[in-house]
Image (cartoon, rainbow, N blue to C red):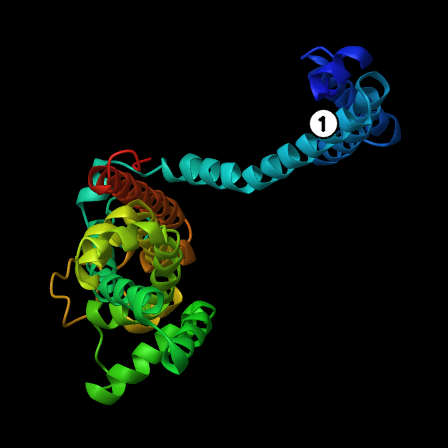
């Protein structure tokens, strides 16, 4: 019978399940003792040195007891786990900072009042006007970008051939990497030429965000459509279904979960942009429900201006940041529900 990995482990011995935790505790204790002798210990250096000692010690113990193959597997697992922990550190710290500082002024009054008549260090006033403005600007940008991005991706995957498809692909790649301030300058120059230099509106800001959002939608939807098996298309064609109906009923329906996720990534990409909105929509202290005329407040610009004022304004900025995070989380929840409802049975996640 061929020798299996489990039989090799049984012959050479296997470490108990608690061994990696014991080695980790010993490594951290050794690092803490080392820094206590040399200088005053701090968290980051102790964790860094302890992690390096753990990788070496865990591999050495496993190699001595379980063999070289299992030791390599443990080392790879430890490296992947360490990479995950390192990646989670800035995310967890960001969420913690936003929550701890944003909850200072975050309340129902903050969500339902604007800044009309608020001056200096007055603790009253909220971000209702900025929330409405953010929804206006992001909603209009989504109405522009999502259909345009989806149709462009469908053309590239299902129809695109030759020079035109290659030119669109290159253009999308270039647009993906442009700085946000360039999008703001584009919208500012466009509306200055068409309407005039004094014009500001939510639509103007939405155009600048659409420039940033469209390539993200195109690229994500394109990748999702390419993941749909060709056998599904061929089966539909074999039944006599035309190509356009196959795309609508089979391809898009199969990829709807991934498309929804890609659209949400694109919205999250632009909903917190500040630089283009500073140039295109400005800031006001009251609610403006006309998206085609007049300056309008948005949460990113509101947070930027309030933080620049300092004092109570800084607390309002953190509360606005928390509100923005909550809106993104709510949109992601809605997207998950939509993708689960519309996905074919067995494909919903």
Quarter where residue 7 is shown: top right
Classify the position of the N terminus by image quarter: top right
Quarter where residue 33 is shown: top right
| Image height of 184 relative to 269, above or below | below
Q: Position of residue 163 (x, y in %)?
A: 40, 82
Instruction: Identify the residue under disc 1.
Output: 74
| Image height of 33 relative to 274, above or below | above
Judge the density around disc 1: few (<14), some (14-19), many (≥20) Cα neighbours within 10 Å: some
Q: How many marks?
A: 1
Instruction: Tell me which residue sits at (31%, 79%) in the image.
Output: 188
Tell which residue pokes out farthest to the bottom in this image: 193
Visible in this render: residue 123? no
Instruction: Tell me which residue sits at (40%, 49%) in the image.
Output: 314
**345 displayed left or right of 58:** left
Nearest the viewer among 6 and 195 is 6
Visible in this render: residue 335? yes
Nearest the viewer among 327 and 242 is 242
Tell which residue pokes out farthest to the left in this image: 290
Nearest the viewer among 124 and 150 is 150
Quarter where residue 210 is shown: bottom left
Q: Position of residue 153 (x, y in %)?
A: 32, 64
| Image height of 195 relative to 172, above or below | below
| Image height of 33 relative to 209, above or below | above
Classify the position of the C terminus by image quarter: top left
**314 displayed left or right of 40:** left
Secondary element type, mark 1: helix
Instruction: Tell me which residue sits at (19%, 85%) in the image.
Output: 195
**69 displayed left or right of 271:** right
């Amino acid at each position: 019978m061929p020798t299996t990995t489990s039989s090799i482990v049984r012959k050479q011995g296997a470490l108990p399940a608690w061994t990696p935790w014991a080695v980790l505790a010993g490594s951290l204790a050794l690092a803490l003792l080392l820094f206590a002798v040399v200088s005053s210990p701090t968290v980051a250096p102790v964790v860094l040195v302890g992690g390096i000692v753990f990788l070496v010690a865990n591999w050495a113990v496993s190699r001595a007891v379980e063999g070289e193959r299992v030791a390599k597997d443990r080392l790879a697992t430890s490296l992947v786990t360490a990479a995950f922990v390192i990646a989670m550190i800035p995310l967890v710290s960001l969420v913690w900072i936003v929550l701890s500082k944003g909850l200072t002024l975050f309340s129902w009054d903050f969500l339902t009042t604007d800044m009309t008549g608020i001056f200096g260090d007055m603790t009253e006033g909220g971000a209702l006007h900025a929330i409405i403005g953010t929804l206006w600007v992001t909603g209009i940008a989504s109405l522009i970008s999502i259909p345009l991005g989806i149709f462009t991706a469908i053309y590239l995957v299902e129809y695109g051939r030759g020079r035109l498809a290659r030119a669109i692909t290159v253009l999308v790649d270039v647009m993906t990497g442009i700085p946000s301030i360039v999008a703001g300058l584009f919208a500012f120059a466009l509306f200055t030429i068409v309407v005039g230099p004094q014009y500001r509106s939510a639509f103007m800001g939405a155009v600048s965000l659409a420039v940033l959002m469209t390539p993200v939608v195109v690229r994500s939807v394109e990748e999702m459509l390419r993941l749909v098996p060709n056998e599904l298309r061929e089966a539909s064609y074999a039944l006599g279904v035309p190509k356009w109906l196959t795309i609508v009923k089979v391809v898009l329906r199969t990829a709807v979960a991934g498309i929804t996720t890609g659209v949400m990534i694109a919205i999250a990409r632009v909903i917190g942009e500040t630089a283009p909105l500073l140039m295109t929509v400005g800031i006001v202290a009251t609610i403006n429900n006309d998206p085609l005329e007049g300056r309008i407040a948005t949460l990113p610009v509101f947070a930027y201006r309030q933080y620049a004022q300092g004092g109570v304004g800084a607390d309002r900025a953190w509360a606005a940041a928390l509100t923005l995070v909550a809106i993104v989380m709510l949109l992601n929840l809605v997207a998950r529900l939509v993708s689960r409802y519309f996905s074919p049975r067995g494909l919903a996640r």
